[in-house]
Amino acid sequence: MTFNLDDFLIKSQKAQASDIHINCNKIPSLRINGEIYKISTDIITYSDIQAILEKTLPFEYKDTIEEKKDFDYIYEIEGVSRYRVNYCKDIYHGKFTFRTIPYYIKSLEELALPEYLKEFTKFNNGIVLVSGATGSGKSTTLASMIEIINQTRKNHVVTIEDPVEFIYEDKKSIITQRTLDIDVKDFKTGIKYALRQDPDVILVGEIRDKDTLLSAIQASETGHLVFSTVHTNGTIPSINRLKGFIEEYGQGQFMKRLANCIRGIVHQQLVPTTNNGALTPAVEILTFTSTVIDYVKDGKFNEIYHLMQMSKQPNLTTMNTSLFDLYEKGIITKEVALEYSLEKVEMDQMLRGIYRNNVVDETIL
């Protein structure tokens, strides 16, 4: 029997799958609430893989399939959903991963994200970063913040993505969306030309190299608000990651520029709840206050974390504080709080009532 991709994707959406895995010579699998489930159906054949490739791969890529062997692109079933697709070659002769991207962009409240994130949409310039592992909801969070700008500000927003995921409908703002490889060569080039397109806000899909980072800094220094993502395991590790892009010679001057540009870093992970394993975000927030800026310039990262530990304010929140709050509200279990903690000794003490954050005088923040 020939595999019907659209029917399978529609059924997967009804099952609330976030990701769909279709691998040659295997049965398909779905990720639901963070776990993989194998589907009782026929094995995917090589002919099925070739048919899916022919059906979904953008024509711009078809002449380079043997050369690149790995593609990211968008596939859409109108009226159902959009999907971010990765196709790669493997020992089983080809594999697809479909990530569900809903048409509807949820609000921060609907995503159970901190209301404080709205503050990052009010800046006129600077850089706002969202960090986390693959599948942690970074793109969804960014889309929610861009949609706030779309609804509240008369701006021009340019997005440079790999590929374009959420589609925006112009409201108070106008939004231009560009896809890597199809509309623009790379992130650095995309930022360069975005600056000639009268932007107020620029969304860069990911900062993953020195050139993209320096281009984002330049854009922020010339009066633009830049949003982007980094793949790291925390707000402070994000600073270290950016620092690592620059050679040791010149890091001092670079850190001063970086500290003056960044407005805030948000780190998030999706954790299983007590509601049948449904996922909810745990969020760490590092706002670049004057004190934080001084610490970054001086490389005093331990002091930054200590400041976050002491704070009771939403602009400085550790992952442990977020997890503990979810535990106190009965949303997650004690075991989940400890498993997903970035500082497990501290988390264990918090759960046993030995340690609780002290209040710091917010006038110094």
Image: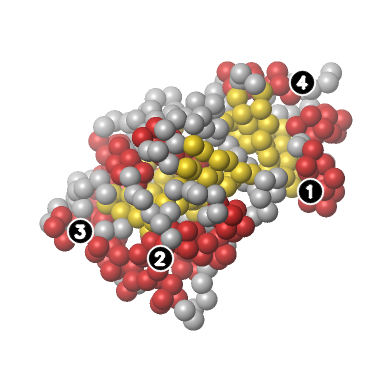
Q: Specify whether 337 is left or right of 206.
A: left
Residue in front for this viewpoint, 281 or 362: 362
Q: Residue furthest right?
A: 47
Residue in front for this viewpoint, 43 or 242: 242
Residue under pointer 1:
69
**SS class, disc 1:** loop
Residue under pointer 2:
258
**SS class, disc 4:** loop
Q: Specify whether 149 is left or right of 356.
A: right
Instruction: Calculate the distance from the C-alpha at mark 1 to the C-alpha at mark 3.
Output: 50 Å
Instruction: Calculate the distance from the C-alpha at mark 4 to the C-alpha at mark 2.
Output: 49 Å
Residue in front for this viewpoint, 54 or 202: 202
Three-letter code, disc 2: Leu
Residue in front for this viewpoint, 179 or 339: 179
Packing grade of label 4 (10 A; few <14, some 14-19, many >=20) is few
Q: Which mark is residue 365?
A: 3
Residue under pointer 4:
4
Q: Evaluate whether residue 237 shows in this view.
A: no
**Dot placed on the residue nearer the N-terminal end, 3 or 4:** 4
**SS class, disc 3:** loop
**Dot placed on the residue nearer the N-terminal end, 4 or 2:** 4
Depth check, mark 1 against mark 3: the one in front is: 3
The residue located at (59%, 30%) in the rendering is: 100
Three-letter code, disc 3: Leu
Three-letter code, disc 4: Asn
Instruction: Calculate the distance from the C-alpha at mark 2 to the C-alpha at mark 3.
Output: 19 Å
